[in-house]
Amino acid sequence: MFHRDNNLLILAAILVMLIISLACGGTTTVGGSAEATVANLTEPISNEITPPLTATDQKPISNTVSPAIPTFTPSIVPPTNTPTPSVPPLEVVAGRDYIRYGYLHIVGEVINNTDYWYDFVKVVATFYDSDGKVLGSDFTYIELDELPPHGKGVFVLSSDVGDAAASVVSYKLQVQGNQGASPPYTDLNVRVDREYSQYDYYHIVGEVTNTGDLDCEFTKIVAGFYDAEGNIIGADFTYAELDRIPAKGSSPFDLAMGDLDDGYDHIEVWVQCHPVR
């Protein structure tokens, strides 16, 4: 009986050891043979690559350099209230004035400040006494029939104001003309060959040549006499000796000028005619 009980105890001990071995994952030798049990000791190694961040997750690095903002002080031009002076189309300039034989004489020029020809250029004078009252008035036309663009014409105004001449202390000159005149015949040359004085007149003599293809009538020669400062002191005109200068022809002239008591420094001469068409 004691032997049976020992066997039972041995079997029970073996069972207990078998149970403990299984619970601990080890290896147990039963009946002299070994059986290997593979245990999952670690987690499997993952070969997956973590995907990159999406566009919404990524924050791109900006390499853009913000340009520098230029700074400057604006140049401010203050407005000006100075009006631009107005240049008149025709401008009258007085030169010499004097009284002789009861006549008040005014010698002057008219300047054409435009790009147009003018004709019938008229100069009007108003005479005043010391109280600013009008003593009289008179008018004349420039010696040239047509005034060229940006050119000048001369005039002599002689007014018969009688006893009032000595009372004139000032005068006003005004000018007007017809703009848009037709250009005159320009194929003319004038030449002064001689100057001399005789019987209180100063003569200039010369010749006009018609270089064009048309005959000329009423060929007019105008002379302006100037002092050393360029002020006009006298003016007069004459006509060519021939009433009609043929094409390619010429004619002499003799212009006699009086009232040059103050003398003169130089003269300017102009010529115009009416072409025969």
Image: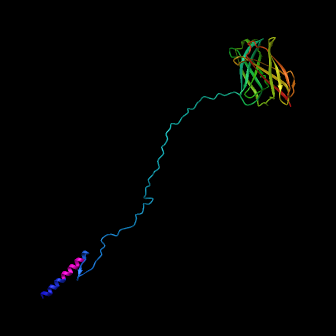
Which picture quadrant has residue 13?
Answer: bottom left
| In the foreground, 68 or 119 | 68
Give the residue at x 17% y 85%.
8
Along the horizontal axis of the image, is 49 left or right of 238?
left
The reply to whether residue 192 is visible in this rendering is yes
Along the horizontal axis of the image, is 136 left or right of 214?
left
Which image quarter holds the C terminus?
Answer: top right
x and y, in percent, of residue 73 in the image? 51, 36
| In the foreground, 51 or 108 | 51
Q: Which residue is the extreme one toward the bottom?
A: 1
The reply to whether residue 202 is visible in this rendering is no
Which image quarter holds the N terminus?
Answer: bottom left
Please state the extent of the stretch shown in magenta in the rendering.
12-21
Judge whether 53 appears above or below 155 on screen.
below
Of helix, strand and loop, which mostly describes the magenta segment? helix
In magenta stretch: residue 245: no
x and y, in percent, of residue 244 in the image? 87, 25
x and y, in percent, of residue 212 in the image? 83, 30
Which picture quadrant has residue 198?
Answer: top right
